[in-house]
Image: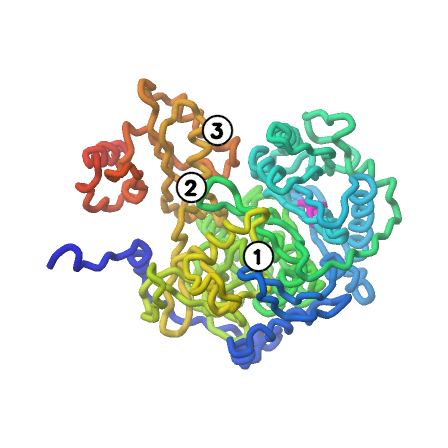
Amino acid sequence: MSTKDVKKTTEAQIAVHWQEEDYYYPSSQFTGQANLTDPSIRKRFSLDNFPDYYTEFAELLTWYKYWDEVLDTSDPPCWKWFKGGKLNASFNCIDRHLNKNKNKTAIHFVPELEEERVDHITYQELYVRVNEFAALLRDFAGLKKGDRVTIHMPMSAELPITMLACARLGVIHSVVFGGFSASACADRIIDSNSRVLISMDAYYRSGKLLNHKQNADEAVQISKNEGQIVDKVLVWQRYPGKYSSETPMVENRDFFVNDVIKNYYGERIEPEHMLAEDPLFLMYTSGTTGKPKGCQHSTGGYLAYVAGMSKYIQDIHPEDVYWCMADIGWITGHSFIVYGPLALCASTVIYEGVPTYPDAGRSWRIAQDLDVNIFHTAPTAIRALRKIGPDEPAKYNYHFKHMTTVGEPIEPEVWKWYESVVGKGKATIVDTWWQTETGGFLCSTVPGIEPMKPGSAGPGVPGIHPIIYDDDGNEITQSGIAGNICIQNPWPGGFQTIWGDRDRYVESYYARYCKDPNSKDWRDWPYLAGDAATRSEDGYYRILGRIDDVINVSGHRLGTKEIESAALVVEEIAEAAVVSVAHDIKGTEPDLYVALKPGIESSDEIVQKVSDTICSQIGKIAKPRKIWLVPDMPKTRSGKIMRRVLGSISNSQDVGDVMTLANPEIVETIKNMVQNT
């Protein structure tokens, strides 16, 4: 048999190695109180009834004016949901709850230091604080509908207050994860043309009070060098009335929110009547090229979708205490700490610090003290808690009815520990699959209807209709065979475009499997998620990871090109290649291979320089596991670096046949260097 007759097995197909697991069924106690127990939802949300079934989610909100059209497909693939409808996200998350629930806790803010008291913010207090800050943004910062604001803040009660104040005015917010560097913040300021930066002086991380204000100064300077001027930097204080940063305030540019807001006591701002298709926020995500993509999310479609997902998949009731351990700087925090739970009048928990400070029992003490009954976290956190505190949950008296896992695939063994030890065998689990771009869940079991299966995300959530294509655009129907998972239909939570770059939006997410670029029929525009997946015979999907050059570290997406670009800032470096390495806690982490310019000698100093540059350019989250200085990269005859070979070496796997490379001898050299260290 000739080599051309051998069908190539993709890396994704090789990854399908574990067997299908047994079902776990929700308890009758859970289903008895669940928000969604009607199995006919699947029929109602079939493609035959698309797009009208999504009005069920929209009806969860309060509208100033109902929509004229459920879905406008006139400008594909920039879909417009609930076109002509008018509403306000801040009103839906606060004002409409006041009549019956003004004294209910909206936000439980838990400081990292256990000796500090938990701050319980009622819906009435949230209303007052959001209105006063909205007045400050409008009258002091000069912001109006359509302006963009960059928010670089840690986990704090002031972060959702800031977001909701922006939403009240129709100002588009762009939140940057607090752990990102000044350079990453500046990238987002420049791309969104923000002239106001909102920051905080300091926050706690692993017991240390970190200086956060210095990031604001650096970000503003970098932005200025690129031509984007920031007029005002508004600084919240970790301890109101006290400055906790060594970085001096800049006169006539930097202002303490706690000082200025006194001038707006008692102010009430009428919420801006926003069109459903008006942007609510930008959320930047890593892409396969260096520049982060500003995902533009709408007001009406997004809010309707996260309200629906929060109610029916998260099973949130107004009386629940709900804790999502994500950071608000990621889409999970936007959708399932702020907008989804607050739209449903739930109590949402915001924890400032790391879940293992000061010890592995901290998370369970918080759960016990606040009587948390819905718990939402990532496999990375579950793996870490399992490793350092496997017996801790049993020591505490908390009761979860429902638990979520999100951000990356979870191994069946870790899932089972989560279910039996953290959930004490009584919680229903949803293993959700979705993305920054999608706004809310794509695949998950409906907890009150369908059984759980370790290792599988489940079917598409009601309304989402996945399909798996091979590289040539043929549908894969055989179970256990991996391909590229796509979504056949638009959905309200999906992002509208990439801010300022519609062509990149179309090219990245729709062009590959588009059946007709001139068509205005949504059926011709399947959404490419960029993940590999398989579908089992029962219709459950197993997600296998990225098909592009994005590494998922602890649930955070990092573009390999971003890391490589940062490494190449170091003048001694000629080439850089990033590969992902399996890690038992983080899921994956990056290994960085660098080749030096001719005449440069290898040294530990260069390794440190590269590491420091990546941390300053992107953030510590992107710090490589290991930086290897290699004499040359394995390359094809056309000069392309063979990252697959490097990945195999880092993961101690067989590199396969490398004799077709231009320099096959280098593979053995690198292999000896890496695997004998």
Compared with residue 648, is residue 612 higher up or lower down, i.e. above or below?
above
Q: Secondary structure at mark 2?
A: helix
Residue under label 1:
495
Amino acid type of the residue tagged 1 in the rendering: Phe
Nearer-the-camera pick, 561 or 377: 561
Foreground mark, 1 or 2?
A: 1
Name the kind of residue labelled 2 in the image: Thr
Q: Which mark is residue 346?
A: none
Circle 1 — which element?
Answer: loop
Q: Earlier in the sequence, mark 1 or mark 3?
A: 1
Distance between the alpha carbons at the discs numbered 1 and 2: 23 Å
Highlighted range, magenta: 156-160
Foreground of the two, 599 or 275: 275
Q: Is residue 466 visible?
A: yes
Q: Earlier in the sequence, mark 1 or mark 2?
A: 1
**Predominant SS of the magenta segment:** helix
Q: Quadrant of the C terminus?
A: top left
Tell me the CA gap for discs 3 and 2. Answer: 15 Å
Q: Which residue is mark 2?
A: 560
The quarter of the picture where residue 454 lies is bottom left
Q: Which residue is mark 3?
A: 613
Between the residue at mark 1 and the residue at mark 3, the CA separation in whole angstroms equals 32 Å
- Give the foreground label among 3 and 2: 2
Check the picture and name the quadrant holding the N terminus. Answer: bottom left
Image position of 567 with respect to 148: above or below = above
In magenta segment, residue 260: no
| Residue in the image at 19% along x and 45% along y | 657
Q: Three-letter amino acid code at disc 3? A: Thr
Left or right side of 190 for 503? left
**Which residue occupies the foreground of this view, 417 or 151?**
151
Q: How is the image coloured?
A: rainbow
